[in-house]
Image (tube, rainbow, N blue to C red):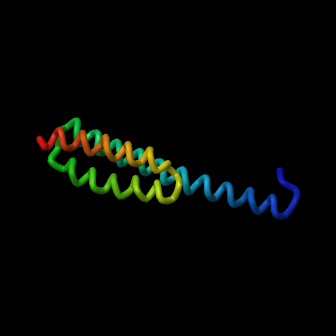
């Protein structure tokens, strides 16, 4: 437990950031799962799910929750999967 005032503040900030980052990461996993499910079901809603997933993944990368390369790789793989189902 921190004793110095500045250390206490840093601890509070750390907890806030961690909670925010966890929420963003959870949201990313949820939308990726939704796209994968749409692809598995060969749903016509897959492109719309992909579009929202790309926006959310990009936002997470901008916030630093996910590394830029990881975000790019996820988007690329999801796009390939959706295109395969859509017959492009």
Task: Assign the C terminus to one quadrant of the image.
Answer: top left
Please name the residue shown 63% across and 59% down the image: 16
Q: In the displayed structure, does residue 75 sit left or right of residue 68?
A: left
Query: Residue 6 or 67: which is nearer the viewer?
Result: 67
Q: Position of residue 74 (x, y in %)?
A: 37, 43
Find residue 38 and report its horizontal and vertical position in percent: 23, 42
Q: Determine the residue positioned at 43% across, 51% down.
A: 27
User: What residue lies at 33% left-to-right and 52% top-to-bottom?
Assistant: 53
Can you give x and y, in whole percent of width and height, for residue 87 in the image?
Answer: 11, 41
Whether residue 45 sits left or right of residue 22 in the image: it is left
- In which quadrant of the rendered view does residue 80 lie? top left
Kindly give the residue lying farthest to the front in the view shown.
69
Left or right relative to 86: residue 50: right
Q: Position of residue 6 (x, y in %)?
A: 81, 63
Residue that extends furthest to the top in the rendered view of this protein: 40
Does 44 appear above or below 59?
A: above
């Amino acid at each position: 437990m921190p004793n110095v005032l500045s250390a206490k503040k840093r601890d509070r900030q750390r907890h806030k950031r961690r909670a925010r980052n966890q929420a963003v990461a959870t949201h990313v996993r949820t939308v990726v799962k939704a796209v994968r499910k749409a692809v598995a079901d060969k749903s016509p809603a897959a492109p719309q799910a992909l579009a929202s997933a790309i926006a959310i993944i990009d936002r997470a990368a901008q916030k630093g929750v996910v590394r830029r390369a990881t975000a790019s790789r996820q988007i690329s793989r999801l796009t390939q999967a959706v295109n395969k189902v859509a017959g492009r």
